[in-house]
Amino acid sequence: MNYPVFFILFGCFSPPALGQEILTLQSCLDKVGNNSLQTAAESGVLNVSGINKQFHWWTLLPNISANAGLNTSFGRRLDAFTNTFATNSVNSQSFGLNSSLQLFNGFSYFHKQQLFRTAIERDQAGLERKRNELKVRAVETYLDLCKLSVQVRLAESRGEKYRQIQTVQRLLIKEGRIHVIDTLRSHNILLEEEDLWRNLDNESKLKWMDLNFQMGQPLKSLYRVDLSSIAVVRENIRLDEVFQLELIELESESLRNEWKTERAKILPVVSLNGLLGTGFSTNNKDYLLAGNPTKSYSRQINENLYEGIGIYLNVPLFNRGEWLKTKRINAVKREELESRKELIDLQLEKQTLELKQKRLNLKVKLEQCKQINDNLEIIYEKSLLLYKEGRLTYPEIEAVFMEWQQKLITYETLQFDLLLLELFEPDFR
């Protein structure tokens, strides 16, 4: 009987070529961090906050507005330009400039300036939180690809072991010590390995597409993962509760400044107003001339020129309870934030303790699993010798072999789980 299946398997799953670029975990995280498409919304919010702060100082400048009017009056009315009554139709035009500058507004400018600063810090924290989420996802995907590469290596090792078993089987068949049914069983196992490798190939390609999407690279790009790069990554992934606490602190700061801004509204406002204008009216007659003709347009513009300047004091007396309502709402919000902060503090402590306990537990499991693997390897080697002597059946050696291989997969999985935990907490290193 020929045994071409094992060689077919290597064609079914083609591992990354040696010429492909090696992608370290740190390089992966750098590419994810530089992918602006993933954080476009958060960056936009941050930019808007920066613009609001940048232009806020413009509120210190005076308001300047221009006005122009064209009016036709009928019936008896007082003409503003001549201070006389007109009983016929009067056409008039007016032009002017108005300016207003607040000299004192209860320090609301400084409170709002602090509000804008806090908003920038809050939006920056939101952007960092988003980047951290993307890094967590990228780390998980990268570790999945590392697991797949290990599974491929173990599958190749299993194929080599089955080749050794088949070599033994051919010798035993020639000696008439076993039946050909054993080779059929091992042949079926190799067919199952073929299906497994095909699934690994498909899953690996999908994972690379996902990781390329996260990094902003062409979706069909292929790299080689570097398992050793996981332990030397330069940055740690932060727990989400850390960002939540930071955002709560900034939200509390915003509430304090909002309250100060609202409180400033009950203080007097002092403003400086100025105006400049002129106008023309058909009722403005020149009584020194015969027939009392309307004064010329240019003459009226010059004669009707007026200027004015004044300081105004605005003292709020009653605002229908708005200030008291705002005060109570602000107090409720601050109390809610304190409760949220206390809860998240407990959650962060709980998460930290759980991660530490998981790490300790994984270390113990890894050591125990390694000992079991070493024992199972020895058992398999001894069992293979017994199988050669005809003292064990093929199902028995296959059971020993599969138990060993399953434990190897468990050991590799535990190692990746431990690496992931160490990325989350700097104190673990």
Image (cartoon, rainbow, N blue to C red):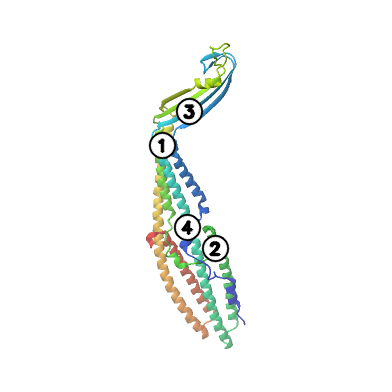
Q: Quadrant of residue 230?
A: bottom left
- The mark that comes first in sequence, 3 or 2, is 3
- The mark that comes first in sequence, 1 or 3, is 3
What distance separates the C-alpha of mark 1 from that of mark 2? 52 Å
Contact between marks 4 and 2 (CB within 8 A): the answer is no
- Residue at figure coordinates x 42%, y 44% from the top left: 118
- In the picture of the structure, the residue carrying the numbered disc 4 is 135
- In the picture of the structure, the residue carrying the numbered disc 2 is 208
What distance separates the C-alpha of mark 1 from that of mark 4? 39 Å
Q: Amino acid at mark 3?
A: Asn
Q: Quadrant of residue 177?
A: bottom right
- In the picture of the structure, the residue carrying the numbered disc 3 is 98
**Image quarter hosting the C terminus:** bottom left
- Residue at figure coordinates x 40%, y 54% from the top left: 348
Q: Nearer the viewer, mark 3 or mark 2?
A: 3
Q: Residues within 10 Å of mark 3 (few under 14, many from 20)?
A: some
Outermost residue on the top side: it is 290
Expressed as whole percent of the image width and height from the top left, the position of residue 268 reads: 39, 29
- In the picture of the structure, the residue carrying the numbered disc 1 is 109
Contact between marks 1 and 3 (CB within 8 A): the answer is no
Q: Amino acid at mark 1?
A: Tyr
Outermost residue on the front side: it is 289
Expressed as whole percent of the image width and height from the top left, the position of residue 425 reads: 40, 59
Contact between marks 1 and 2 (CB within 8 A): the answer is no
